[in-house]
Image (spheres, coloured by chain):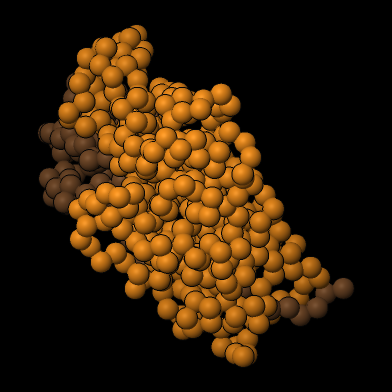
């Protein structure tokens, strides 16, 4: 038999404004590409391979390769600022 | 007592036959039944936390939910905690949310690490924590529900749900509860927190992102070297995160082993230094004799010798080995607890914020250090 009960939400509020995602680029030719390596062993292999392939045939104006300080921590704010200021596109990956 | 309407968090009414099943349906559970909170239980827990239910203690990553005192109380009641545990759980959450701990990474990692909590000082006794027989096991309300409250908060407020923001490949049983106290009463050494500058009458929590305990058996050694060599054997694996990127680990010495070690006059610093000096791996073993190519591991300190036959420490310094005494009176067992690696630092925090060490020399075991 049902009855009226109090309930509690244990999750706590998230006090942050949602950010809109950047508009996806329609073409990459002539763009400046950032590659952000999370510094895990296999991420580096994957991303270097992508870098080589795109450098050969994608017509990018520049490919800039960046590395996080630690794979287990967020990229430093100044690194993110640098990537945003000097690039049009970013590729990142997790290779565990 | 407050009426239900004064509760800031979502205290609302629902038509339900069984609140335990209802909470399961909301997805708030760690898999075990939750204790349905009542206004009276929440009020008592908030009062034990100092009142002011909307006061935010911290934000819990990676979801970054706000841990107000009321949300803390809700999770503690759901876990089965008594109000007497409130200060311990709060101190543990503040320690976990210290940036040095990198809870964001601990929650999300593919590794099986989970926060280990070890309590020192009179708060252990006041909460009736188990530091003795079966300390890491079941059967004690404080150990079980303090650890469970932490896990519920990591899930509900931190969003560390398996497969969503918790990407652990295997997880571990320590993700239900992982909480003990140091057995200061049977330990022949000064308590851990006194070694770190606190007074014996202070109470502290220690948190370490860690694997579950690994048993160390030694029933024959009648000297410190033999017992500690067995612990070194457990430490000297090539497959722990400590082996591949240093960091910190904990060693929990059983009372019988501790008495044998102390009988020979060895102190805490002797234990730490012996373990550090004699545990480790050959560089070539860490890299499979270059079977998979030469790998430069930049996770290690620059001063490690990168040569095939060089002995590589398991952690960078003796101070990165955290020694505790716990367990029952009988049994020649200890435990190694490998850490997550250098990407998280353990945090020691006073349960009463006013009890921070005064600074200056720290004196114990007849020696003072700055």
Residue B119 visible (yes or no): yes
* Quadrant of residue B292 within the rendered picture: top left
Q: Colour of chain B?
A: orange
* Quadrant of residue B286 within the rendered picture: top left
Above or below residue B267? Residue B354 is below
Residue beneath the point at 59% across and 59% down:
B129
Above or below residue B87? Residue B110 is above
Report the chain shown in brown. Answer: A
Residue beneath the point at 22% across and 51% down:
B369
Count of numbered badges drawn on the protein: 0
Above or below residue B41? Residue B100 is above
Q: Position of residue B252 (x, y in %)?
A: 49, 41
Q: Nearer the viewer, residue B357 or B255?
A: B255
Q: Position of residue A60 (x, y in %)?
A: 16, 32
Residue beneath the point at 50% across and 40% down:
B259
Q: Nearer the viewer, residue A15 or B59?
A: B59
């Amino acid at each position: 038999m049902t009855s009226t009960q109090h309930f509690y939400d244990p999750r706590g509020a998230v006090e942050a404004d949602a950010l809109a995602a950047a508009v996806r680029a329609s073409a990459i030719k002539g763009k400046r590409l950032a590659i952000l390596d999370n510094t895990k062993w296999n991420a580096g292999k994957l991303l270097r391979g992508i870098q080589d392939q795109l450098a050969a045939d994608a017509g990018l104006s520049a490919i800039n390769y960046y590395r996080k300080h630690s794979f287990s921590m967020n990229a430093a704010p100044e690194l993110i600022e640098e990537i945003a200021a000097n690039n049009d596109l970013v590729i990142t990956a997790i290779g565990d | 007592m407050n009426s239900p309407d004064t509760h800031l968090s979502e205290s609302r009414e629902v038509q339900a036959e069984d609140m335990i099943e209802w909470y399961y349906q909301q997805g708030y559970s760690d898999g075990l039944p939750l204790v349905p909170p009542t206004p009276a239980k929440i009020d008592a827990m908030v009062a034990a936390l100092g009142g002011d239910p909307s006061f935010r203690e911290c934000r819990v990553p990676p979801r970054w939910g706000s841990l107000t005192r009321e949300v803390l109380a809700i999770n503690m009641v759901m876990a089965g905690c008594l109000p007497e545990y409130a200060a311990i759980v709060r101190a543990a959450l503040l320690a976990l949310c210290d940036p040095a701990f990198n809870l964001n990474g601990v929650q999300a990692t593919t590794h099986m690490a989970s926060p280990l909590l070890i309590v020192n000082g009179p708060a252990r006794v006041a909460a009736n924590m188990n530091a003795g027989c079966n300390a890491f096991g079941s059967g004690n309300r404080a150990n079980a529900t303090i650890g469970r409250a932490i896990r519920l908060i990591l899930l509900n407020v931190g969003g560390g749900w398996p497969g969503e923001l918790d990407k652990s490949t295997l997880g571990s049983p320590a993700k239900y509860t992982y909480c003990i106290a140091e057995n200061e009463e049977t330990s022949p050494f000064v308590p851990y927190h006194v070694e770190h500058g606190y007074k014996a009458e202070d109470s502290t929590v220690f948190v370490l992102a860690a694997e579950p305990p690994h048993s160390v058996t030694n029933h024959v050694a009648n000297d410190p070297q033999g017992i500690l060599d067995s612990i070194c054997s457990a430490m000297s694996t090539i497959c722990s995160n400590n082996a591949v990127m240093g960091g910190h680990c904990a060693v929990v010495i059983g009372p019988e082993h501790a008495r044998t070690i102390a009988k020979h006059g060895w102190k805490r610093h002797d234990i730490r230094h012996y373990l550090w000096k004699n545990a480790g791996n050959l560089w070539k073993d860490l890299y499979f004799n270059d079977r998979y190519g030469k790998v430069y591991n930049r996770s290690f300190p620059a001063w490690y010798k990168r040569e095939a036959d060089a002995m590589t420490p398991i952690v960078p310094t003796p101070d990165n080995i955290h020694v505790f005494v716990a367990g029952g009176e009988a049994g020649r067992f200890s435990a190694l607890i490998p850490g997550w690696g250098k990407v998280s630092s353990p945090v020691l925090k006073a349960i009463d914020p006013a009890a921070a060490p005064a600074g200056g020399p720290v004196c114990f075991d007849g020696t003072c250090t700055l």
